[in-house]
Image (spheres, rainbow, N blue to C red):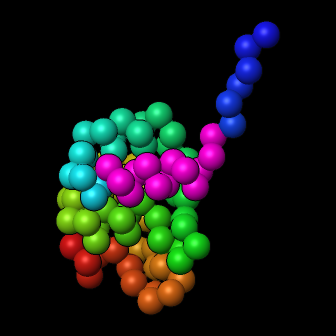
Amino acid sequence: MTEIKEINMVEMAHELAELLRERKEDEAKRLLTRVPALTHFKDDSGRSTVHFAAVGGSLPLLQFSIIDNPELANEEDEVNKFTVFPLI
């Protein structure tokens, strides 16, 4: 019998953050392609992929994230109420 592994979004978000810290943008894009829901996942501070990409200075990943979801560019985090565009 084939076992289906449940996707742990928190682990995926940590993996994405690590890829961004290491400047592995192509791998980060592949991860987002494999797990599209990760684009909308928010951490406990309300930050999503677009926030991580903007803070990390990854314009290509930011563009990749918002191309199909332009509304993500205006998302605020829950702590500082930062939107993405002032960070770019």
Asked whether residue 63 is in view, the answer is no
| Residue displayed at 69% across by 37% down | 6
| Residue displayed at 32% across by 49% down | 19
Front residue of this view, candidates 38 and 66: 38
Quadrant in which residue 85 is drawn: bottom left
Asked whether residue 85 is in view, the answer is yes
Residue 64: give x, y in percent of width and height. 31, 49
52 horizontally vs 45: left or right: left
Which secondary structure is most common in the magenta stretch? helix
Front residue of this view, candidates 38 and 2: 2
| Residue displayed at 73% across by 14% down | 2
Most extreme residue toward the right is 1
Residue 27: give x, y in percent of width and height. 30, 39
Quadrant in which residue 32 is drawn: top left
Q: Which residues are magenta?
A: 7-19
Look at the image and say whether residue 8 sits in the magenta stretch.
Answer: yes
How many discs appear? 0
Most extreme residue toward the bottom is 80
Residue 63, compared with residue 33, is above or below; it is below
Most extreme residue toward the top is 1
6 horizontally vs 79: left or right: right
Q: Quadrant of the C terminus?
A: bottom left
Look at the image and say whether residue 46 sits in the magenta stretch.
Answer: no
Q: Quadrant of the N terminus?
A: top right
| Residue displayed at 58% across by 55% down | 10
